[in-house]
Amino acid sequence: MAGSKEWASAEMLEAPNESFMRKIAVAFEQGDLRPLFDALDEQNVVWKSGSAGTGPFRFGGIFTRRAGVIEVTSSIASDYKISRFYPKEVISKGDIVWGLFDVDGEFMPTGKKSCEGHPFEFECAIRWRLHHGKIVEHQSFFDTDALFRQIHSEER
């Protein structure tokens, strides 16, 4: 559980929304999506990724409702094995929460699990809007070109 002890002592000083994001990130890093799904507003959540829906990533675009978020996270999990999702910084003001994360993992395209995967690492910014303690908006921002070059490198 990379990084969870580092922020645990600071958790008491954080706003509740910041602690909320960190706890979900730690569970996500461990492969536990239940805290994320439980934190979503059932009907009114909008999930936007850092890439367009017509781009090279299967998880691009806008997804709505809890079922849409389950769809996009399933798509991510089918090709990407996340080994590190470390919250470097989390800040909030009111119902808006921002997090900056270090993300490491391995890209293993669907249907090619027997081949060697492509390692990747990048920084990701995530913005949440909360309403009554539930996530109603999720946006992620990352360098899609750098990720694309890492996972499609012919040098490996």
Image (spheres, grey):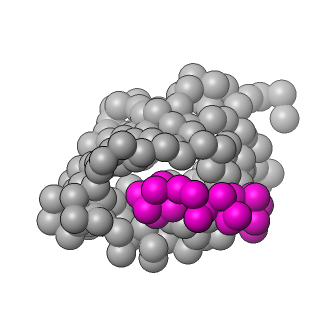
Residue 49 drawn at (x, y percent) = 39, 40
114 and 146: which one is in front?
146
Displayed quadrant of residue 149 = top right
Q: Is residue 5 magenta?
A: yes
Q: Which residues are magenta?
A: 1-22
Count the marks. Answer: 0
Residue at 15% x, 65% y: name it.
43
Q: Is residue 112 visible?
A: no
Residue at 28% x, 55% y: name it.
130
Q: Is residue 134 visible?
A: yes
Drawn side of residue 70 relative to residue 2, left or right: left
Residue at 83% x, 28% y: name it.
155
Q: Is residue 56 magenta?
A: no
Q: Can you name the residue that lies furthest to the top here? A: 145
Instruction: Quadrant for the N terminus, please.
Output: bottom right
Q: Is residue 121 above or below residue 7?
A: above
Look at the magenta stretch and give its main secondary structure.
Answer: helix
Residue 105 drawn at (x, y percent) = 71, 50
Drawn side of residue 14 relative to residue 67, left or right: right
112 and 105: which one is in front?
105
Residue at 76% x, 58% y: name it.
6
Q: Can you name the residue that lies furthest to the right here? A: 156
133 and 67: which one is in front?
133
Q: Can you name the residue that lies furthest to the front here? A: 13
Residue 68 drawn at (x, y percent) = 27, 59
Instruction: Quadrant for the C terminus, please.
Output: top right
Residue 38 drawn at (x, y percent) = 36, 75
Displayed quadrant of residue 28 = bottom right
